[in-house]
Amino acid sequence: MSRIKQGPLYGIGGVTLLTVLLVLCLTMFAVLALSSAQADRRLSEKNARAVAAYYRADNQGVVLMSQAVKLWPAGGARPEAEALAQDLSAVFDAALEIRVEAAEERFLLSAAIPVQENQILRLSLYLGPPESPRRWEIRGWQVEPLLQNEDQAVFLPVWQP
C-alpha cells in the first residue's frame, strides 16, 4: 500500500527565503541607525565648538566692558577717547578692532571680536560717567558674518511698501 500524505507540504525554501529577507531588513535598519547616530554626533560636536567659540567671544566682550570701567574709575577725570581706545587695544594686544567715540558725557565703544573664521561678535556700548545710574547701555551685541567684500553679501528680497 502506498501511503498518501495528508495535509499541505511546506518546502524548506520558503522559510529560508523569508529568514534571509528578515536578516537583510534588520541589517539595513542597523546600518541606517548607525549612520544616523554618527551624523548626529558630528553635528553635536560642531554645535559644541560653535557655542564654545561664541561664549569665548562673549567673555571677551564682558572683559572689554570691565576694562573700560577700570580706565574711567569713580572720582577720576574723564579720559580722552583716543587714549581710552589705545589703552583698551593695549589690554587686548590689538587683537580686537576697538573704536571709541565721544558722545556728549559718555563714550560709544565699538568692537569686533572674532568668533569663528567667518563670524564676528559686533558690540556697540555706551559708557557713561561713573556717577551715572546707567553706567552701561548696550546698543548692539550680535553675531554677524565676516564679509571680505560686499560681493559676498547675500541679501534676501524683502517687500518694501
Image (cartoon, rainbow, N blue to C red):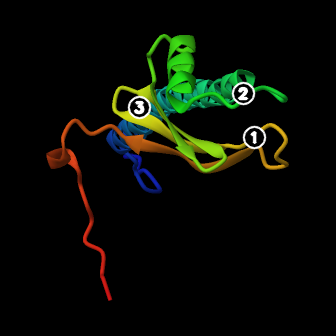
Between discs 1 and 2, the one toward the N terminus:
2
SS under mark 3: helix
Relative to 40, is 132 above or below? below
Asked whether 22 or 53 is in front, the reply is 53
- Residue 161: quarter of image: bottom left
Image point 84% across, 28% down: which residue?
75
Between discs 1 and 3, the one toward the N terminus:
3
SS under mark 1: loop
Asked whether 159 or 32 is in front, the reply is 159
Report the residue marked by disc 2. 72
The amino acid pointed to by label 1 is Pro
Which x, y percent locates residue 128? 71, 43
- Residue 61: quarter of image: top right
The amino acid pointed to by label 2 is Trp
Report the residue marked by disc 3. 35
Res. 23 visible in picture: no
Image point 41% across, 37% down: which residue?
32
Separation (CA) of disc 1 from disc 2? 8 Å
Mark 2 Cα shell of 10 Å, populated few (<14), some (14-19), many (≥20): some
Are the residues flagged by discs 1 and 2 in contact, CB closer than 8 Å? yes
Asked whether 43 or 77 is in front, the reply is 77
Mark 1 Cα shell of 10 Å, populated few (<14), some (14-19), many (≥20): many
Which x, y percent locates residue 157? 25, 71
Image point 37% across, 36% down: which residue?
24
Asked whether 100 or 5 is in front, the reply is 100
Separation (CA) of disc 1 from disc 3? 58 Å
Image point 57% across, 13% down: which residue?
91
* The label number, if any, that marks residue 129 in the structure image: 1
Mark 3 Cα shell of 10 Å, populated few (<14), some (14-19), many (≥20): few
Between discs 3 and 2, the one toward the N terminus:
3
The amino acid pointed to by label 3 is Ser
